[in-house]
């Protein structure tokens, strides 16, 4: 059961072809963390091969004017989310638990079935949404592009992201430019739709020379990469939260937070943060496990200060828009993709979001600091109780 109807396949490729054919449009792509370790499956690469450079080259070959990395925006999400978390840890009046909010299926599930959890939600937007806002403001300004000419296309592992880009709240660029009707993201393509576009153009990804993302919005830390799998968002967040709370870099046990790795439905870890004390955190994958977490919180039985939820088992590496390399999705495929993601993280010179030079630059030159007025306008959102729209019983009531 998918709360965003992501199992119904929608084809948005025509909208992108039309934008690419329009000489007045500047068409900009962003690619989610999970795409690069999955799309190679369609082109004969062993499952879990990282084809990042070829993926970027393929987008340029199709005709995109710029290619941004959603991993960069994942680092930006961490800056805001970790700051929010540390702020709440120090504020005795703040809700005890904070939920991460990168997964739109989980957000919608909560708005319908657990609206009482809204105060516990991080207000930080997902990486897709942050990138959308930054492309039509910061990036457009820096590159001298008229934002109303930009068509912003997100390549995502799931159809739930198509739903997310239609959320009324994702209109920060419109507010910033005072241009009602402007959307932060114009089109979302799934990995499968992107792959179909390549096949229509007879582009063989395997034969392309690697290309790099565009600068300003193209450099990511290892923390941005691990967003692709379950446990990655929380691991990235605690790396930076530790630094923000203590002024020191996280120790190895936080940098590689082993208890939140893997395919277990609910995973837990305990951290010791000097000056803050012991912090318990949890990760749920699959909405059945999210429901267990919410029910425990409502029963007053939850010790966790920070909780990550991803609707898909394994997280986005196994999203509904990814290549169907096994039907139904199998753990052997998920494990290969997860292994690839952690391998990239370990190989990175910079593994902490707060050390990403392009992230430091955007705060120096545009946003000021995390949770600033500008950041609140462009990078934060709100949630709306929707339980009154329900026509069915809660799953737990059946
Ligand atoms: Fe989409 Fe699944 Fe990732 Fe949620 S976990 S954002 S539904 S791919």
Image (cartoon, rainbow, N blue to C red):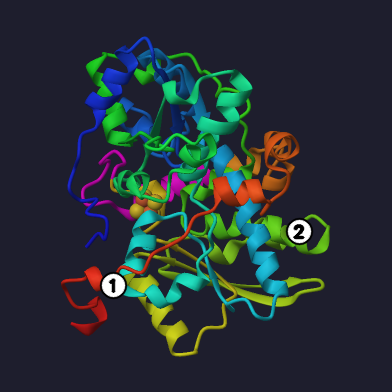
The residue where tag 1 is placed is 387
SS at mark 2 in the image: helix
Mark pair 1, 2: CA separation:
36 Å
**Viewer-proximal residue, 37 or 155?**
155
**Left or right relative to 8: residue 329:** right
The residue where tag 2 is placed is 244
Asked whether residue 218 is drawn in magenta, I would say no
Q: Which residues are magenta?
A: 321-341
Question: Which of the marked residues, 1 or 2, is nearer the chain's N terminus?
Answer: 2
SS at mark 1 in the image: helix
Which residue occupies 49% across, 43% down?
172
Residue 398, image x and y in percent? 18, 82
Asked whether the viewer can see residue 352, the reply is no
Looking at the rendered structure, which numbered label has been put on residue 265? Answer: none
Residue 289, image x and y in percent? 37, 72
Q: Residues within 10 Å of mark 2 (few under 14, many from 20)?
A: some
Q: Quadrant location of the N terminus?
A: bottom left
Residue 322 in which image quadrant: top left
Residue 106, image x and y in percent? 37, 62
Residue 15, image x and y in percent? 26, 26
Where 103 sits versus 89, above or below? Answer: above
**Viewer-proximal residue, 13 or 231?**
13
How many numbered marks appear? 2
């Amino acid at each position: 059961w998918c709360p965003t109807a992501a199992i119904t396949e929608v084809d948005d490729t025509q909208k992108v072809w039309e934008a690419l054919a329009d000489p007045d449009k500047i068409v900009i792509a962003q690619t989610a963390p999970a795409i690069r370790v999955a799309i190679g499956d369609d082109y004969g690469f062993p499952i879990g091969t990282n084809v990042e450079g070829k993926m970027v080259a393929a987008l340029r070959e199709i005709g995109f004017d710029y290619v941004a990395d959603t991993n960069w925006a994942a680092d930006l999400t961490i800056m805001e989310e970790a700051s929010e978390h540390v702020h709440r840890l120090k504020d005795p009046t703040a809700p005890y638990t904070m939920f991460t909010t990168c997964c739109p299926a989980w957000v919608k599930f909560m708005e319908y079935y657990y609206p009482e959890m809204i105060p516990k939600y991080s207000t930080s937007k997902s990486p897709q949404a942050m990138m959308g806002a930054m492309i039509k403001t910061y990036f457009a300004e820096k590159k001298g592009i008229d934002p109303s000419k930009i068509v912003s296309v997100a390549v995502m592992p799931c159809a739930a992201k198509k739903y997310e880009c239609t959320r009324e709240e994702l209109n920060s660029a419109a507010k910033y430019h005072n241009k009602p009707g402007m959307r932060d993201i114009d089109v979302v393509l799934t990995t499968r739709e992107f792959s179909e576009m390549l096949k229509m153009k007879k582009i063989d990804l395997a034969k392309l020379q690697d290309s790099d993302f565009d600068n300003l919005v193209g450099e990511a830390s290892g923390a941005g990469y691990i967003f692709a799998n379950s446990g990655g968002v929380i691991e990235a967040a605690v790396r930076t939260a530790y630094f923000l709370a203590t002024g020191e870099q996280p120790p190895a046990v936080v940098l590689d937070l082993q208890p939140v790795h893997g395919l277990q439905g609910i995973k837990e870890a305990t951290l010791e943060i000097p000056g803050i004390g012991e912090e318990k955190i949890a990760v749920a994958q699959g909405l059945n496990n999210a429901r267990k977490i919410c029910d425990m919180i409502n029963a007053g039985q939850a010790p966790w200060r920070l909780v990550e939820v991803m609707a898909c088992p394994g997280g986005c590496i196994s999203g509904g828009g990814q290549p169907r390399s096994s039907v139904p999705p199998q753990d052997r495929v998920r494990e290969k993709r997860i292994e690839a993601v952690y391998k990239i993280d370990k190989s990175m010179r910079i593994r902490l979001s707060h050390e990403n030079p392009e992230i430091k630059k955007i705060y120096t030159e545009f946003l000021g600091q995390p949770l600033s007025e500008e950041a609140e306008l462009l990078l934060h959102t709100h949630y709306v109780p929707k339980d009154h729209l329900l026509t069915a019983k809660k799953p737990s009531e059946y």
